Image (spheres, rainbow, N blue to C red):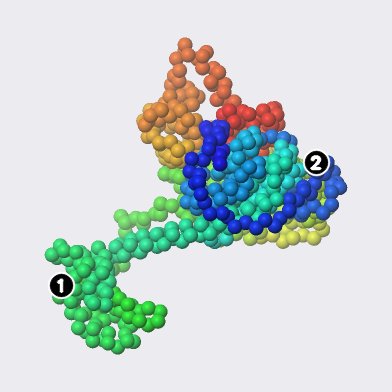
Amino acid sequence: MHLLLRDGNGFEIRRDPHEPEERAPLPVPRSHKQRDAQVDYSNWKQFVEGKRMKARNVDQSLLDSWRRCKDMAVDPAPRSCWDFLPMTQLEQFTVTLEKICGEIESTAYDLIKGKGLLMTIANADARVARTCGDLSVLREADRLNFGPGANWSESCVGTNAIGTALATGRPMQVFGAEHFCESHHRWNCTAAPILDPRGNVWGCFDISGPISADHSEAMDLVLHAARALEQNLSRLYCSELEGQMASLFSSMFNSVMTGVLFLNKSGRITSANNTAELLLNRSGDALRGRKAEDFFDMAPYLAKAKNASLCEPVIVKCLVNSSLYIRVMPTFSASGAWLDTIVTVSETQRARQFTAGPRTASRKQAEPEEVAGFEHVLHEGTAMRQAIRRAANAARTPSTVLLTGESGTGKELFAKGIHQAGPRAKQPFVAVNCGAFTEELVQSELFGYREGAFTGAAKRGRVGKFQKADKGVLFLDEISEMPLSQQVNLLRALEERAVVPVGGTSPLPVDVKILAATNKNLRDLVDRGLFREDLYYRLNVVTIAIPPLRERGNDISLLAEHHLNRLCDAFGIPCPAISPEAGELLKAHDWPGNVRELVNCLEYAANNLSGDLLLPEHLPHYIQEKAGGRAIGSGDRSRDKGFLLKHREANAIREALDFHQGNISKTAKALGIGRNTLYAKMDRYGIQA
């Protein structure tokens, strides 16, 4: 058996060094006959081109998957997977997989050996963790980048057994032209989800291969392999839970301020916690194994213990320290049999009296360091603290909140904080980027639409963002970018607290708390006729201005340390300290891109680290130049222009992706390049959408 393994940014194929020579067979019945694909190329082409498909008796789950792919704007054209995660980010899953896989993978391979098939195990996010099988088919899989770290979800590579099984929670077979992306039409694949003991999807087991291979037993095999993995996963969970409970009990046993001892039926001490040792053990010898009567007058307890119904604690005297308070109590089994005895030891404490006097000016009330809901907003300065207080106060009421601030200041973080800090915390939080929709789509996205409302509408219609946020919070980001012609429809929904779906006639009541955000001056847009004045007053009920990073003082250092630690941890590299010189450069910069720019700057630095200190030369050149430093000597500038140009191009791509919320088509159009060119540049600069 061979494995397809990650090798830097590519893959390599190796023989499995741990493959056992002999193993028990996996009990798989051979009952299924290999089916044919339900659709052919012409049917697939009709669908992707928006035409009426002539094929009949097509499984509804397949059509639903195709529609999901179309809604997510998945490109059906031939291409390999481009979305990868470093294997370090899958380590938690792969470590568990190694523990439960055992001989399941090897015994399953025995049943597909020589059939031109491969096996794949992916996590719940459709990230491939392990791919193995015959050498020839692994080479074909390598051409599609079907290897560890690859994203095999529907949103990335369209309809496929792994992504669709995880999306539906059901076993799936996707053969030939049933794949949404043309590059996979030469493959058949079968997958079944793997559930954890709580019933949640943990991963997926898949068997794939060219359409010419023998797939007749694939469904039976993936079902049995998935069930076997689930059984091992349950055993592992139980084992870990048992260990955690034992550790928890030990920690509790030794951390309580009361001494606790366990006695067996002969009256010997079998266990004693740290407090009991401190209170009773004056000689320094361990208590375990000694007779309880050496420390306590057990006669009153033994006299009452003759009564089998005894269940109340008995107070006895301590022979080694008369000031200690001793309680003895038996434990019983479910059948009523007397098991062990528990002894608790505590010091006699005097009651303390507290007098409540008038509050004086010299005694200040302690202020909480964190506000509930805003724990993740890192800050030390007064400006941000005041903004958080205002946001927390506004979270308590149903009033509309307008968040203002420059791009990258954390408006969405504030919106989520308001949601968590208010009475709607357990209800939905729905975020909408008002600048991401065309004028024609605003109404259908916000208010939904009925069946047949327009050409291309989903068969059963669609629920809009307002209805999805019912009883919760609706966050209208970049509200200034909403088309002027559509603002009246939003105003009506806010005033009437009801929406009318496109193609519908009856208003549907909705109960939402509205949060809006903008990085522009709405009052100025109103004066210029670019924003409705009545909508402005409807939104401008509680305005919270989020301060820019340059006005937050020491917050820059706090945020820099936090994000550098986070990035280095994600990259799997040691996190250095920030040198005083680099720290001064960070404080001196005016941060026009605010926290988002700071994070990009630190990611750049993390990729240039070479020691245990982050130095000025690790920072982007523009940070040094704007601060008055010389990033490079004058003789080196002509040589370094190429590097600066690449850095600016990478930043331009990141900013465009951020503005268009990761939409590849819109980003490519904004940059004036093709989608494939954009993918190539993203790979070159290590940028993820």
Q: Which residue is mark 1?
A: 321
Report how many numbered discs are placed on residues in the image: 2
Quadrant of residue 568 in the image?
top left
Quadrant for the C terminus, please. top right
Above or below residue 97? Residue 521 is above
Is residue 221 in sight in this rendering? yes
Q: Percent position (x, y) of residue 59? A: 77, 54
Q: Earlier in the sequence, mark 1 or mark 2?
A: 2
Amino acid found under the numbered disc labelled 2: Tyr
Give the camera-side residue of 628 and 216: 216
Q: Residues within 10 Å of mark 1 (few under 14, many from 20)?
A: some
Q: Which residue is mark 2?
A: 41
Is residue 145 in sight in this rendering? no
Above or below residue 682? Residue 452 is below
Q: Secondary structure at mark 2?
A: helix
**277 left or right, relative to 563:** left
Q: Percent position (x, y) of residue 473? A: 61, 55
Tell me the residue at 73%/53% (across/down).
Answer: 33
